[in-house]
């Protein structure tokens, strides 16, 4: 997958989401004035679903693009290298004697067992680092609630700037909170035009912003390790 193909995939997915939001928003023209605030509750659910859905899909598509390039772990940034070593880290963390990553039999002493696993990990680090790059796209996890901090966590895992949408932190969290209140049947009041417009503008900025960011990284190969080792 080339960088341009990657961008085309993103833009295609983003387009249908924007069209769907616009379609349901346009139905306001046929709804009685005193029912419009109530109808916007449904629009909030749709808007949020596309925010979370597109963020997850775009990050996973970015991973698929990088995986398709035939790189080794040593060739990419520390964040991506760490993401690609998820299997090794999990095997290290659970101290599983039968791990297919750490195969040497370990001492019985539990304290020494942990240190021995560290020795084994360090001794094999060069081997781990030289393997083909293959990141599991399950590393992207929106946790069914894309709070601002959750968005930051997912960007961080892939070596992307975490403060890109700082300006919209309050709007993102407010949208998630309102979506949850509506979805759980706890929010009886309607949504005003001003409220929805603010969240809609913020969402569109974030969706277009993540598209530009990922294409920039793909096109300019910013996923690759630079001279300083980052």
Image: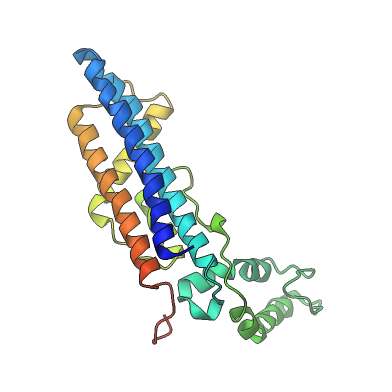
Judge by depth and name the residue closer to the eye, 178 or 35. 35
Q: Is residue 189 visible?
A: no
Left or right: 11 in relation to 138? left
Residue 19: where, in percent of width, then height?
Answer: 33, 35
Q: How is the image coloured?
A: rainbow
The residue located at (78%, 76%) in the rendering is: 103
The residue located at (38%, 65%) in the rendering is: 160
The residue located at (50%, 52%) in the rendering is: 141
Judge by depth and name the residue closer to the eye, 173 or 49. 49
Q: Is residue 26 visible?
A: yes
Left or right: 99 in relation to 216? right
Left or right: 88 in relation to 206? right
Judge by depth and name the residue closer to the eye, 102 or 200. 200
Left or right: 130 in relation to 103? left
Judge by depth and name the residue closer to the eye, 14 or 107. 14
Residue 220: where, in percent of width, then height?
Answer: 35, 72
- Can you tell which quarter of the image residue 132 is in? bottom right
Residue 217: where, in percent of width, then height?
Answer: 37, 67
The residue located at (33%, 32%) in the rendering is: 44
How many numbered callouts? 0
Residue 37: where, in percent of width, then height?
Answer: 24, 21
- Can you tell which quarter of the image residue 215 is in? bottom left
69 over 116 or under it: above or below: above
């Amino acid at each position: 997958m080339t960088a341009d193909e990657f961008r085309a995939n993103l833009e295609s997915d983003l387009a249908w989401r924007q069209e769907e939001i616009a379609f349901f928003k346009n139905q306001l023209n046929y709804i009685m004035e005193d029912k419009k605030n109530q109808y916007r509750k449904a629009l909030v659910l749709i808007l949020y679903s596309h925010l979370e859905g597109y963020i997850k899909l775009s990050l996973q598509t970015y991973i698929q693009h990088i995986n398709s390039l035939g790189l080794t772990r040593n060739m990419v940034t520390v964040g991506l290298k760490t993401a690609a070593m998820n299997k090794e880290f999990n095997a290290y963390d659970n101290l599983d004697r039968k791990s297919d990553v750490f195969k040497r039999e370990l001492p019985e002493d539990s304290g020494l067992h942990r240190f021995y696993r560290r020795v084994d990990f360090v001794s094999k680090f060069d081997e781990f680092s030289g393997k083909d790059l293959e990141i599991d796209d399950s590393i992207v996890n929106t946790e069914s609630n894309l709070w601002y901090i959750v968005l930051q966590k997912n960007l961080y895992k892939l070596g992307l700037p975490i403060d890109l949408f700082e300006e919209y932190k309050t709007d993102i969290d407010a949208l998630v909170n309102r979506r949850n209140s509506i979805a759980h049947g706890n929010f009886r009041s309607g949504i005003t035009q001003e409220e929805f417009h603010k969240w809609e503008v913020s969402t569109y900025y974030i969706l277009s912003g993540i598209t530009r960011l990922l294409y920039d990284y793909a096109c300019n190969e910013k996923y690759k390790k630079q001279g300083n080792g980052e």
